[in-house]
Amino acid sequence: MSKFPEGFLWGGAIAANQAEGAYLEDGKGLSVSDILPVGKNRFDDLKLEVRDGVFYPSHEAIDFYHTYKEDIALLAEIGLKCFRTSIAWSRIFPNGDEQEPNEKGLAFYEDMFQTLKSYNIEPVITLSHFETPLHLVKAYGGWKNRKLISFFERYCEVVFNRYKGLVKYWMTFNEINHTHTLPLLGAGLHIGDVDEKEKLEDMYHASHHMFVASAKAVLIGHQVDNENQIGCMLSLSPVYPATCNPEDIFAANELRRRSLFYSDVQLRGEYPAYFNRIVEEHELNLTIPSEDLAVIKEGVCDYLGFSFYRSSLHEAGMKILGNTGGIIGKKNPYLQETPWGWPIDPLALRYVCNELTDRYQKPLFIVENGIGLHDKVVDGKIDDRDRMVYLKDHVEMMAEAIKDGCNIIGYTWWGPIDIVSAGTGEMEKRYGFIYVDKQNDGSGSMKRLKKESFHYYKKIIETNGASL
Ligand code: BG6
């Protein structure tokens, strides 16, 4: 018997910058992802320009811009009920601050969403997935400048109106709680030499402006179509205390709050009391106008979308400042790791769903979960057993969380077709049920090939989870 509610949104998720390529086609402008090279250190020494002789994976990616019809047809064979992708803001407003949108960009997404609908696949759309127009970072300093709020508002008005009736599920900022590490959010951080206090001030200003922008997006989206469901999106792999030492337990909770701070604001509509202490302890000088607080209060998100890949261990004394967990942390001796060193912890998915339900009592949407593996083609086949095991174990824990009373509306596997890794820019870090013949250096035929897991996920969806 199925453990999943009828209408459960089984799906897959990608992001424009990791799949589309065509980085300057049909009037698209550069986004912050277009200046990131391949490699673990891709965020170091960033220059806000495209340099000669450097390979940038987003420029071609898997060429989804030209292959989306065939790729969606393949994804439809799996039986996806929904498909999450993002709109590249710089396709619609190439520089971000124009008055008029780029029609070719709008037409591209319209056709893509219609293609999805023709297969009864519900589009789930992220408004900003590491795709802030680069010009907004160069000319305005990125999200630490409040002018970006009105640019984002204009972009939202355009896309909500244009895709009315085609798109119902939206998310505002992908992994907004990573504002501290990811210049990808266009926060303008880590660029230039600034001290820690200034970095924190920039981070919280950028976050605040995104909170206001997100709240305005919710208000506009509801006004355009009251059917619209607009979520926030966080990276919420959980943090465990490294030991039962109360110091570690307390420190882990402090770190967790650095992440939950974002959903606290976006789902409760106000800054939590503990934020005052962060401001005081770091002597931060922040400008948070009261009229913004009224907007945040009104524009509360409808659901919580989150990514889940792993858990991490935290110990008292480890530096936290703006960090929200995830990349940092100690090794967990109880868990195996992926080839990229990410601890595999399905039970943590049940744990985190319960944690979030207890805290918010809002619908949850697991919009990213998956495993990066080195897939090898042998005799024209790819046996990706480890991916199937990961999928099975996580879906089972999701079923348990539903039994626990969590209202989970859907699950979108990250990268159902191989795409460029956000963290390292590699193609080799493959998440897909569909293999794309493209390598880290950009070589390859780009041919698509079904992996074993393709059939496995299809069966899960077909039986609404009962085949597990
Ligand atoms: C999330 C992002 O952080 O994790 C995705 O929202 C990203 O864009 C995914 O691709 C997996 O990370 P990575 O580094 O393996 O691509």
Image (tube, grey):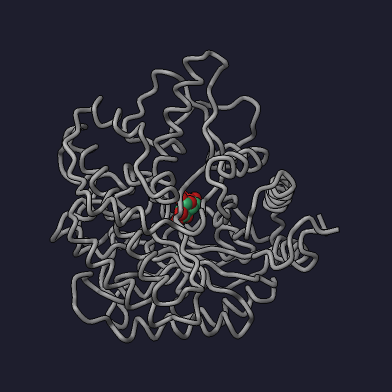
Residue 315 vertical placement versus 135 (above, below): above
Most foreground residue, 222 or 57? 222
Instruction: Examine the rendering and report whether any part of residue 185 can be seen.
Output: no
What number of labels is visible? 0
Toward the left, the furthest residue is 139
Residue 437 image-quadrant placement: bottom right
Instruction: Locate the C terminus and report the quarter of the image it occupies.
Output: bottom right
Does residue 328 appear to the left or right of 286 in the view shown?
right
Query: Against 434, is 234 above or below?
Result: above
Q: Nearer the viewer, residue 261 or 248?
A: 261
Going by the image, does 275 lie left or right of 369?
A: left
The answer to whether 182 is drawn above or below residue 221 in the figure is above
User: In x, y percent, where is residue 440?
Assistant: 45, 58
- Taking the spot 20% from the left edge, 50% from the top edge, the residue there is 144
Residue 264 visible, this orientation = yes
Residue 57 place in picture, x, y as percent: 38, 62
Tell which of 21 and 118 is nearer to you. Answer: 118
Seen at 32% across and 78% down, the residue is: 158
**In x, y percent, where is residue 444?**
50, 68
> Quick check: 85 left or right of 278?
right
**Residue appearing at x 48%, y 71% in the figure:** 228
